[in-house]
Amino acid sequence: MPRANRKKCKLFKRYISPYIPPSFDIDSFTTDLAQSQLVLNPSSDVTELFDQYDATLAELLDKHAPWQLIKPRARSAAPWYDAECRVTKAKTRKLEKTYRRRRSTQSEHAWRVQFGQQRVLFQQKYIDHWSRTIDLCHGDSKALWSKLRVLLQPKPNSCSRLTAGEHAHYFMAKIDGIRALTSTSPPPNIIDRFVSEPLVDLRPASADEVASILKRSDPKQCPLDAAPTWLIKHVGDVLAPVIASMCNASFNQVKLPDRSKKAIVRPLLKKQTLDPNDPASFRPISNLSFVSKVVEKVVDARIAEHVNRHQLLPVYQSAYRPHHSTETAVACILNDMIGVLDQGQVGALMLLDLSAAFDTVDHGILTSVLRRRFGVDGPALDWLSDFLSGRSQVVRVGTSESDPVTLHFGVPQGSVVGPKRFLEYAEDVSLILNRLRYHMFADDMQGFKHGRPDNVPEIVSALEDCASDISAWCAAKRLQLNAEKTEVLWFGTAANLRKISPDVSSIRVGSTVVTPTTVVRNLGVMLDAELSMREHVSRTAQSCFYHLRRLRSVRRQLGRDVTARLVSAFVLSRLDYCNVVLAGLPTATLAPLQRVLHAAARLVVGLRPHDHVSQALRELHWLPINKRIDYKLCLLVHKASIGQAPTYIADMLTPVISVQSLSTQRSATNGDYIVPRTNRKLGERAFSVAAPKAWNRLPTKLKTSTCSTASFKRSLKTFLFQSAYGC
């Protein structure tokens, strides 16, 4: 065998790339797809139709993008390094060899000119690649960060030595352990709830509906897919009627084929600070086929419409719901907590943690809850039961894969239908939490009780009783309350907190005594005992400066425009996250965040450390920190006024015109909101006070405008920019 042929080869399929290969004729592929039996004569049996879908796409890809044998590189080329770069580099090397051989001035000049052209080409390819990468991420900071790890050269993490089999064994053993601990618990007491119009049938899907879903879907893909997602989206006009037929066949025959119930689980490290060799540090995330998730989105749209029309979910559940977010949840929580301080009282916030909540959902209990409390019955309920049954998964770590495992419990975390069904599964826990001021975000539950400093024993007793009842509720639902991860924060003014004795401030959860802490992390926001937000500001500034240092190392290669977009994704997004909780804080407290903004402007524009940044901020059209807070406050008020905010946000705002005794005043016609009175200066930081104040400062034309939200955002930013910089 010749020496050149003895090099290792591997199979490679060109369509794996997220970009269209130059040799791939997509028009020819689309034509063949439109003339295939899948489009012209699809099977009527749902299982055969799903098989036909996968087989047709695989066959056409084998025809238009066949497998090829290639030689593996000693090291992988940079993602921006393409054929043009290789040709240019080869030409440069050839001229260099000519100069080394001849040593003439003419050959040296030709080599140096060509080398300069190569450098310009490489830099432009580099910038173009990362510009395309940013565009493909569509503002998703998490996806963008995962793609830019190589670019920003992160500190190497210690690699995990755990195998796929070890991960799979731990995940299943954890579920079995929770099931064993709750096996002797009595069945849950499901209280029937009348729903005037039960959801019995799933409305048929249309091609237009599926085409809209395809356009909105992220270009993520799974090894189980017969074709890459970008290609399916590109030929969506041809495939939309086919996928709609697949949805309707699944609904009519009340069956989701087994191949669409398979999942590839990839362990995800919960935090970078955790031990990568401890399986408890990982969260199992299911990766499902793209077409199965499209079917789930169609189903979920029908269930969500039913649930929202009848208002079946708790008001204070903010996960997986339109116009709800962690920001609105934190705004509501902190508003209530500041109200306690404004009344001169103290409170205790209890944050509860559930162990593997999504993975231990009992399918039988879930179907009972859906039927008895959510009015889902008939074929619709049968389809959901079939969706939950017969699921299987394998754990994949690198190139290793565990043995397939059949799942008898739980909802897949990477699915569309699964996580939202957990909201319905845990809906009735709100009947217990109602004793407290509470809020929920999926499986994160929290509540607080407040009173005078001399009523601490009563507060402790109320929290312990609530925690005990929630623990019993969890056991009946075959869930487990993790007492060791439960946190308690006593909050109040410094004077009132000193009146609380450490001997009576602990909370007993089961057999565990939870000692109060001075700072807790609540949905990404650091809350301290005095609600000063200094810890949150400090942590945010620290994180932002870390990312600025990382970006500084590649600033010269990326150029100003790309750097500005990266700074917006990694730094400004952190400054703006939940910044409504910073309303009314002293300028000195917000100063670290303003310094971050200045450092970011210097990085983008290319200023020296001590150069003035006022002009740079104007050029970038960046608002200062206090105006960014006002922007978020006014935006939430605007959304509440047009019905695009949670009920609990709208309930905190009272338009002047809605009060009969004030409806004739000028402020009523100006679109103003009532500013509640407070007892202390601290009370002005509550959202219910700070938001109306910020809104009432806007010009009447902007407050009474009926334009779209996008247009309102532009006008609002223009006004705040002019008021900040006087231009």
Image: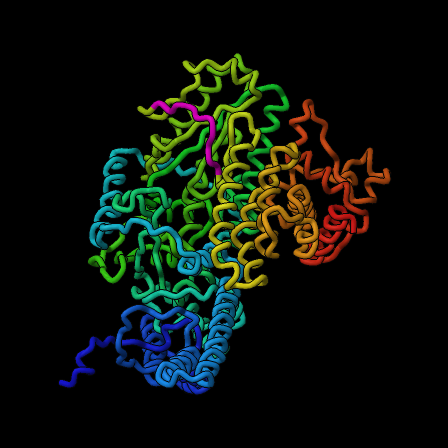
What secondary structure prevails in the magenta region?
strand
**Quarter of the picture holding the N terminus:** bottom left
Q: How is the image coloured?
A: rainbow
Residue 205 visible in the displayed image: no
Give the x, y percent position of residue 581. 59, 37
- Specify the farthest residue to the front: 104
Residue 553 visible in the displayed image: yes
Name the side, left or right, on which 694 lies relative to 296.
Answer: right
Give the x, y percent position of residue 308. 55, 50
Q: Is residue 517 magenta?
A: yes
Labels in figure, total: 0
| Point 38% across, 25% down: residue | 514
Give the x, y percent position of residue 613. 66, 49
Name the side, left or right, on which 264 lies relative to 470.
Answer: left
Give the x, y percent position of residue 592. 58, 38
Q: Is residue 421 magenta?
A: no
Instruction: Examine the rendered structure and indicate whether residue 389 appears above or below residue 499.
Output: below
| Front one among 537 and 375 | 537
| Front one among 39 and 696 | 696
- Specify the farthest residue to the left: 1
| Front one among 79 and 445 | 79
Q: Quadrant of residue 677?
A: top right
What's drawn in magenta, residue-wise? 513-522
| Point 41% across, 50% down: residue | 419
Q: Quadrant of residue 96?
A: bottom left
| Point 41% across, 30% down: residue | 487
